[in-house]
Image: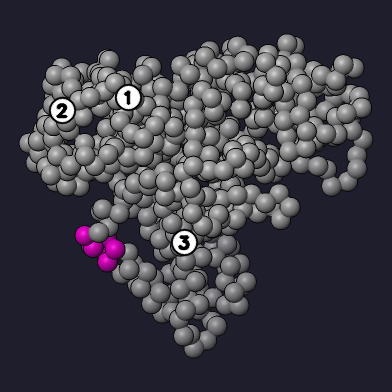
Amino acid sequence: MSGQTRKKIQKKLKIRGYSLKTDGLDEILSFVNRFQDAEDEAIDLLLDQLDHQSLISSIIDKEAVHQVVSLLLEAEAAEEESPSSSHSSIRVVDAFLIPKFRYDPIKKHFFQHAGSLPIHGEASAKAALYRDRLLLLFQRVSRDQHFIKPAFDTDVDTSPSCQLSTIQSLVGQRGRRWVMGVISQLEDGHFYLEDLTAAIEIDFSKAKITTGFFTENTIIVAEGEMLSEGIFQVITCGFPPLENRDKSLKVLAGHDFFGCGTLTKEETLRLADLEKRAVNDMFVILSDIWLDNEQVMEKLETVLNGFENVEIVPSLFVFMGDFCSHPCNLSFHSFSSLRSQFGKLGRMIEAHPRLKEQSKFLFIPGPNDTGPSTVLPRCALPKYLTEELQKHVPNAIFSSNPCRVKFYTQEMVFFRQDLLYRMRRSCLIPPSTEETDDPFEHLVATITHQSHLCPLPLFVQPIIWNYDHCLHLYPTPHTIVLGDRSEQKAFKYTGITCFNPGSFSDDSTFVAFRPCTQEVEFSAL
């Protein structure tokens, strides 16, 4: 292995116009060996630093390398000693602060939306929502090896490529074609497939489908042929293929889709190293904490007592709504009592000094919690309700639903919505049981392939048109937490850890999650 690394180091130095002495190479090798999983980044970082040094000669010896290595290690030590470093390991991103990017199909790159985004968008914003979703997946599919057009014209029968046709080009065509589009119901009971060129009626009756929930608004890739009556008979259909996270990041050319800012190679390397050592960090995630229910509060106190007495307390507690057993709608008139119940929770946390000092507390509203409307994304809980709690727990964080958390280099998405029940109700075709009959696995496959947290029709779950990008899952995060009233589940899918912590109020279940090892520990009282 070190032989390969040696060759890699020599090649990279040669490209930059340096030649290397043997003792210099050994010194570089000992530095690079500290970063087993990130050799390339370590070499590049070292060479970038060498470029900034005023070197006497282009021949690199042990002395020159040692100088640079010392500087880098000093910088890392200083970062670790600084009090801010422990707090910067967890960063919470509110959905309304996530930057918006759009894909330009002509220039084939993403550009950031400049200017404000009104909550009440114009009619064009609704059309843009669907167009942006389609283009996001189209640019991903266009890089997939199965859909890339061959560089040379070959005999169609021998070519494994499944070239996509536009829907407009299907008119008058015979034979099988591959198309990609959004499932829409343009007339009652008649389903159509739409892309940016046209719409065509589709027939799913003989279709062989892949894993997932096929609902209105989902984007599919379908193989089929035109019938004489102008209907597209679908033979096989599935969701657009997934793309490896690293491949997506290379294409994005430094754009910050997550909302935490872009990091230099040096910072990424340092954070990855710190993350490896953070084996004791643990997140405790509870969903459905009814503050107006005595039994729930007693159970919550039992949980806090348990974690107060462990050797290393959890780094983060995530409390997801609903925070009240009754929906906070127009008929709800107990806001003052809910405010005092939040105060009671604050006093309960304050009574656990180790948790109060060393843990962070994140609150995410549920679908029935108080707020301007039930539309997604939902803003954080109103200050009126949370003021009492913040007096006792000043470092409590109140964020939107969904919300994003960055743990060193890991990206996590938290979403509290009873999504499984609603997706199953909205299904147009019974899900395929060929690969799995677990509904949660179907749900995870749907949202990851759609790169969207809630691909339901807008009349089932309204979304703020201008803020649909806050629900995008692109590039794919490392972890997706789906708070749902259904039973506890975890599913690792194509390298993404997805889990549902269960409903704490219904069956006393919650999850202890170790981000360093992606270990999901189901817990219950």
Q: How is the image coloured?
A: one colour
Q: Nearer the viewer, residue 319 or 378?
A: 378
Residue assigned mark 1:
329
* Observer able to see residue 75: yes
Is disc 1 placed on a helix, strand or loop?
loop
Q: Amino acid at mark 2?
A: Ser
Asked if the residue under mark 3 is in contact with the one under mark 2, i.e. CB atoms within 8 Å, the reply is no
Q: CA distance from mark 1 to mark 3?
A: 48 Å
Q: Is residue 234 left or right of residue 51?
A: right
Say which quadrant the C terminus sits in. top left
Residue assigned mark 2:
337
Query: In x, y percent, where is residue 484?
Result: 38, 22
Mark positioned earlier in the residue sequence (2 or 3): 3
Q: Where 293 sits versus 469, above or below?
A: above
Residue assigned mark 3:
265
Q: CA distance from mark 2 to mark 3?
A: 50 Å
Is disc 2 placed on a helix, strand or loop?
helix
- Give the magenta-colored segment's residue range: 77-83
Q: Residue at x 61, y 53 (%)?
A: 110
Work out which residue is located at the far left of the displayed protein and give it: 351
Query: In x, y percent, where is residue 467?
Result: 49, 42
Q: Amino acid at mark 3?
A: Lys
For the stretch drawn in magenta, the main secondary structure is: helix
* Observer able to see residue 37: no
Q: Amino acid at mark 1?
A: Asn
Other-residue count near label 2 (Cα within 10 Å), few / some / many at <14 / 14–19 / ≥20: few
Is disc 3 placed on a helix, strand or loop?
helix
Q: Nearer the viewer, residue 162 or 427?
A: 427
